[in-house]
Amino acid sequence: MRIAMIGSGYVGLVSGACLADFGHVVTCVDKDPAKIAALQAGQMPIFEPGLAELVAKNVAAGRLFFTTDLTQPVREAKAVFIAVGTPSRRGDGHADLSYVYGAAREIAAVMDGFTVVVTKSTVPVGTGDEVERILGETRPDGDFAVVSNPEFLREGAAIGDFKRPDRIVIGTHDPRAEAVMRDVYRPLHLNHSPLLVTGRRTAELTKYAANAFLATKITFINEVADLCERVGADVQDVARGIGLDNRIGSKFLHAGPGYGGSCFPKDTLALMKTAQDSGAPMRIVETVVSVNDQRKRAMGRKVIAACGGSVRGRTIAVLGLTFKPDTDDMREAPSLSVITALQDAGARVRAYDPEGMGPAASMLDGVEYAADAYACLAGADAAVLVTEWEEFRALDLERVRDVMRAPVLVDLRNVYRPDHMAQAGFTYVSVGRAFVA
Ligand code: NAD
């Protein structure tokens, strides 16, 4: 099947490459000429494990193409996916749908024959109705169907998630569109990935409900962690103790600096707004949003407290900048709030991240970047581990202690064990683990 993917970012590029790998002929379109030029030259505009190889393989097989012009690919495609960004709208937190509607207008102008327009971007309930209206308005004679097919992949594990999803959600009541979507995902269906066909609005809401639930789970364990610190309990054990209950499950129960990334912050906010506008406010989600916002900056204060109450004039080493490991995505990363809080308190910040320093440089002022973890730690008065990249999991503690001016480590991901760190001579602070030596 010929497929056009409008938007070649984290979701569009990964989805396009995976669909090509299923055997479809996919053209990824993007408005950003630099992104397309890089892709045509075999360079990945983002860091995602396995992506470069997957793209190269499918380009070589003649199944994957890149262009800035959607005319030809849309005209030839049976399914046109919209995978453009839906960031928070400045000022009110609603999802900004201008890119989605813009893409819909461009598609409408050129589509030819029966076309299934599939919204893969995360969009509020009712967006599919508006996309349908735009298509119909531009092409009253058009033969098309609008389907919601939200994407659940995680950055850092995106290819595996796309190819082996827990489920595929398809929102349509149009039998012709459903048949096309079943063809798109046939290889996964053969793999026994459940395919859930629902109404379009239900599919749209399912994505937000999933993300809000996961954000709630993280925020819940984060608050349990704070309580653990006050009462002398260990959040890791509490998480294990509750996570082994099948009704709860062990995932998303890792206490830390608060959730970030390109999805949870904006999606919880957008769901909150939709719920308020619909007269069914979701108080739990409202609280999660507010607790998480405050938490990220509070992590800066945690570092300051570990330094004895002041960081003025001190050098703080920040290990990890991206919102999670195995991505270069800095959107809403907790490191941004932690670093700003430290700088506001007069600290000098030196940072190292395996993939995120390029994107971080345009988002942070006054940060010095190091070539590796040890260069980052050299001469530092304290260190804070913000992102649990694999290479930070087994630091040579003796070497760390030797290169730092003072052996103070604030571990916001609970990578190390409090007893080991105490033995190694560190002042060690983690999240929700009140260690008494
Ligand atoms: P992104 O910002 O990485 O990519 C979006 C791309 O769309 C950009 O490259 C932009 O240039 C392009 N674009 C915008 N308008 C266009 C147009 N009219 N024609 C062609 N290209 C256009 O965004 P992303 O992270 O891939 O997210 C896309 C959507 O998927 C969002 O709604 C997001 O919420 C959702 N989503 C993201 C993830 C994730 O992990 N990143 C996971 C699931 C769902």
Image (cartoon, rainbow, N blue to C red):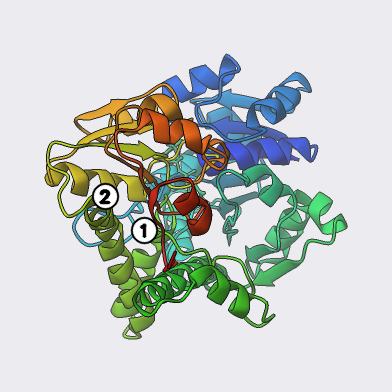
Can residue 332 be spotted in the picture?
no
- Mark before the other along the chain sequence, 1 or 2: 1
Q: Are marks 1 and 2 in contact (CB under 8 Å)?
A: no
Q: Residues within 10 Å of mark 1 (few under 14, many from 20)?
A: many
- Which residue is rendered at x = 58% and y = 17% of the image? 40
- Which residue has dot 1 on it? 266
Please identify the residue farthest to the top as the structure is shown: 41
Q: Position of residue 69 (x, y in %)?
A: 50, 26
Kindly indicate the quadrant of the structure image that contains residue 276: bottom left
Disc 2, SS: helix
Please identify the residue farthest to the bottom as the structure is shown.
Answer: 280
In the image, what residue type sits under mark 1? Answer: Lys
List x then y, in percent, for residue 68: 48, 25
Q: Can residue 108 be seen here?
A: yes
Instruction: Left or right? Give the position of 389 relative to 57.
Output: left
Closest to the observer, 358 or 73: 358
Q: CA distance from mark 1 to mark 2?
A: 16 Å
Image quarter (top left, top right, bottom left or bottom right) of the C terminus: bottom left
Quadrant where the N terminus lies?
top right
Which amino acid type corresponds to the residue marked 2 in the rendered image?
Ser
Q: Which residue is mark 2?
A: 337
Circle 2: is it few (<14), some (14-19), or many (20+) Cα within 10 Å? many
- Is the residue marked 2 within 8 Å of ligand 1, measured from its CB? no
Q: Position of residue 4 (x, y in %)?
A: 61, 38
Specify whether tag 1 is near ligand 1 (CB below 8 Å): yes
Nearer to the camera, 169 or 117:
169
